């Protein structure tokens, strides 16, 4: 997969992709990530990327010409127009794990990171395939949102994580995770549950699944609606629901 990020602040995106797991994916050749400076596609002496809004009002708007030239150039380097052009914007459809899975199937993503009050409407309406928002809060620009999307997409690429971890995730993905513990067995008087130290893998598996159901019920009951529970999980959920009713 190739991912081009078009931005006026490439420095914001350098850190997230040059550390840890995403860096490893780049080094192993699972993904190529290019930071594209929008100013490199300006043609005037001042390398101007923004201008004042028609009709007046507060703030600046990203001009259409440099964005068009950048995206056309990146598309031409991709071959046969298979790139998907994504605009990060508070007005986009909400990003979630289904959207990450869908994007992970693409060969080439071009992500436009806006700033100021956003981009000229003609970019949105004729250059962009997909508008994405990462959530209902206000950021100062699209770069951090793009970093979130890239992070979620790249970890789904084939070969990124061990097959076992991926399989485990796909079964339990609509539930929250069970609690995790590591050594020491007693930390400041707080003990690791004895079942986890028992070596009984059937019991451990059952304890973890019930903890997942309980946590999801307490914190994200909305997730239980689309969860496919096993018979013993369903029975456990009914038991805790009954305890609540009392
Ligand atoms: C994305 C952005 C701005 C207009 C402009 C470009 N979930 C999200 N919140 N905010 C953004 C986002 C996503 N994805 C976001 C791109 C831009 C915000 N701004 C600033 C804020 C409010 N209204 C400019």
Image (cartoon, grey):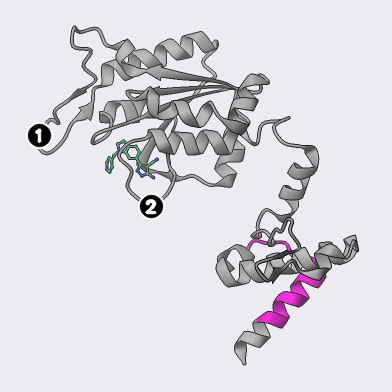
Q: Is mark 2 on a helix, strand or loop?
A: loop
| View quadrant of ligand 1 | top left
**Is 57 inside the magenta-drawn segment?**
no
Quadrant into which the N terminus falls: top right
**Is 238 inside the magenta-drawn segment?**
yes
Asked if the beta carbon under badge 2 is closer than 8 A to the nearest atom of ligand 1, the reply is: yes
180 left or right, relative to 79: right
On the image, the x and y values in percent for residue 117 come to 23, 36
161 left or right, relative to 131: right
Quadrant into which the C terminus falls: bottom right
Disc nearest the viewer among 2 and 1: 2
Residue stretch in magenta: 226-240
Residue at image position (10%, 38%) is 57
Please indicate, yes or no, whether residue 127 appears anywhere in the rendered image. no
The residue beneath circle 1 is 55
Q: Earlier in the sequence, mark 2 or mark 1?
A: 1
Residue at image position (39%, 24%) is 11
Q: Distance between the residues labelled 2 and 1?
A: 27 Å
Residue at image position (59%, 72%) is 218
């Amino acid at each position: 997969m190739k991912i081009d990020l078009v931005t006026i602040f490439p420095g914001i995106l350098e850190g997230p992709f040059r550390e840890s797991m995403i860096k490893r994916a780049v080094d192993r050749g699972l993904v190529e990530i290019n930071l594209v400076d929008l100013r490199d596609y300006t043609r005037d002496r001042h390398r101007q990327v923004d201008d004042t809004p028609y009709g007046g009002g507060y703030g600046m708007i990203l001009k259409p010409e440099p964005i068009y030239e950048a995206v056309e150039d990146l598309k031409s380097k991709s071959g046969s127009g298979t790139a998907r052009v994504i605009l990060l914007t508070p007005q986009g459809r909400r990003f979630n794990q289904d959207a990450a899975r869908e994007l992970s199937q693409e060969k080439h993503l071009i992500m436009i990171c806006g700033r100021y009050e956003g981009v000229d409407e003609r970019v949105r309406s004729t250059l962009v395939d997909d508008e994405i928002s990462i959530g209902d809060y206000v950021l100062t620009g699209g770069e951090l949102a793009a970093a979130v999307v890239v992070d979620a997409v790249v970890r789904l690429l084939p070969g990124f994580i061990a097959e076992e971890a991926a399989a485990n995730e796909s079964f339990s993905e609509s539930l929250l995770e069970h609690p995790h513990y590591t050594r020491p067995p007693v930390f400041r008087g707080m003990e690791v549950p004895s079942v986890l130290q028992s070596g009984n893998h059937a019991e451990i598996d059952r304890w973890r699944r019930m903890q997942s159901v309980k946590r999801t019920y307490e914190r994200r009951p909305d997730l239980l609606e689309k969860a496919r529970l096993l018979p013993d999980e369903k029975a456990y959920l009914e038991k805790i629901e009954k305890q609540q009713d009392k």
